[in-house]
Amino acid sequence: LSAIDGDRYHIAQANSEVGPDGRLIADLVSARYGGDFVLVHPDKVEYMDVSPKQTVSVATALIPFLEHDDANRALMGSNMQRQAVPLIQTEAPLVGTGMEAIVARDSGYVVLAQRPGVVESVDATRIVVKTELRKKEAGSKKHEVCLDTYDLVKFKRSNQSTCITQKPVVSVGETVKRGQVLADGPAIDRGDLALGRNVLVAFMPWGGYNFEDAILISERLVRDDVFTSIHIEEFEVEARETKLGKEEITRDIPNVGEDALRDLDESGIIRIGAEVRQGDILVGKVTPKGETQLTPEEKLLRAIFGEKAGDVKDTSLTVPPGVEGIVVDVKIFSRKGLDKDERSKSIESEDVLRIQREHQDSLRIVEEEKNKKIRKLLLGKVVARDLMDGETGEIILKRKGKMAPEILKKLSDEEVRRIVLSDPEDQKEIEETERLAKEQIEILQTLYDEKVGRLRRGDELPPGVIKLVKVYIAMKRKISVGDKVAGRHGNKGVVSRILPEEDMPYLPDGTPVEVVLNPLGVPSRMNVGQILETHLGWAAKALGLWVSSPVFEGAAEAEIKALLKKAKLPETGQSSLYDGRTGEAFQSPVTVGYMYTMKLHHLVDDKIHARSIGPYSLVTQQPLSGKAQFGGQRLG
């Protein structure tokens, strides 16, 4: 039904009560008609909504207790979930809406099983699942063993400079169904979307440190890497053909000490694992200088004595200000037909070795499966010729004898292959198994040759570029003062102080709270959903539950109270807190509970900037503006 047609019909709400026969129970039902809400008799209702969630978007459907939030704040909440940074340790929300698994699955970041099977091997980089394909040919049921290999993405950079990595959630020997989650992606916890962490919050003022949306957090969140994320920056440099000659990527840079070059290899490219900071050289590069016109004699002398220092200038790629981290990857692209340098060759040989190893694994599993199947087919069958022991030459089994398990155990795979059965049907089945295995091995070999061929070819580069080098630097960002954090209800704030754990307010049982929020941030903003989430989160944590409270059909106040009572927590959701500095109780009870909190992409380390001397604008001779240009304050 389109939106235009919908105006002509009476449409009941999705959560209207329905009897077992599918009829509406109530005498009067709330329905939409002609753009209005009307109460009508059930007989007049022609259509019914599918789900209460159908009126909101996916991002909004992830907000629990949305019906208690003001629209402006709900809008901020759904927009800020897009800015959440994937954390090192993911954790699904205690209070969700039931949409988390659907969003994670549809995001394309989780690895799903294509076919049912058994997990053959698992490591950090790939998962191998053994599946059986049933081939129904001419009524016979033939099984062909097939391997599904799922390669996992490790520590790749996203366009937001965050880290994309997948980690397996299945173990060897586990049986998997089609569509089951095999590996989590970034910000996904066992197949559920997990954009933040569940933290213990208290709504109370604390020494003015949470005035005007500021947030006070415990040192534990820093120490235990609760809000720590990995960010990967990409830097690239290209060697081009200039009018004066070719630029060269090299370790031989004029007027640079050996100390600055200690982490570069013989090709002038930094090694993986090097710790770098502002100003360090990542890739050494020299460009021909063209000020002096040399006479032919000078050119000859230069050519003989190789005095290059005079006619080249240093144009190396260095680390920009504000970046400090570890080199995690280097990619080198060189033009087709050019000789590769040592570094390119070593990267290529590593990749070839990895592909070879994976290829050998696949071949081994196909062989093993084929041998298993042949042995199974031979059991209890009649042999056509005498069977001899390969070493001693004795006859183990006379012709027309039946194959017993103990005889099969003694035989090697090579000897098993030479057995001929008297029944032609059985013999045909064994030959068919051999043929299928051979076909599979041929397919695997073709794939392997393709992969290696792709590695050995040169790269397509823009005209004029001889070589392109990309360096990836990973940074570990702990939460710090000035970082922006937010809940799912548009309740955002900036970390103002990180307090030692022992100074934080603590509960009567001695548990220190992790975040202190300002209660004045709730009434005027009218996003009461965060308070209900806090109450329900406290009860859920105490009972060890994960709760789903879907949009427009969420938990009622009475249900939250019942859960708090069951968890032996105060039904008001408030507890008396004690000051960590003095040990005295605060005057009134304080609302305490678990709230889902996200760290947003507005990180202080990316924004902080200082300059003394730097570039100036050519026209006005004022400093440039902005961090990207290393600018400053413009005066005059």
Image (cartoon, rainbow, N blue to C red):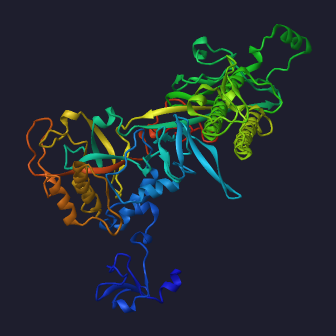
- Residue 630 shows in the view: no
Picture quadrant where residue 136 is located: bottom right
Compared with residue 359, is residue 485 higher up or lower down, i.e. above or below?
A: below
Residue 360: % across, % down: 66, 30
Can you give x and y, in whole percent of width and height, for residue 87 in the image? 42, 41
Residue 398 location (% of width, % of height): 68, 30
Residue lying furthest top: 305
The residue closer to the viewer here, 582 or 347, is 347
Q: Which residue is found at the position 40% from the left and 88% from the top?
A: 45
Left or right: where does residue 311 sit relative to residue 174?
Answer: right
Q: 185 or 210: nearer the eye? A: 185
Q: Is residue 55 left or right of residue 160?
A: left
Name the image quarter holding residue 503: top left
The answer to which quarter of the image holds residue 552 is bottom left
Which residue is at a point 72% across and 47% down the rendered structure image?
425
Can residue 606 be seen in the rendering of this structure?
yes
Tell me if 553 is positioned left or right of 156 in this view: left
- Residues 574 and 31: in front is 31
- Residue 194 is situated, as x and y percent measured from the top left of the image, at 41, 49
**92 or 622, which is in the foreground?**
92
Task: Name the residue: 34% across, 84% down.
Answer: 24
Q: Does residue 474 lie above or below 573 as drawn?
A: above
The residue lying furthest to the right in this view is: 296
Q: Is residue 633 left or right of residue 329?
A: left
- Check the image and report above or below for 18 versus 460: below
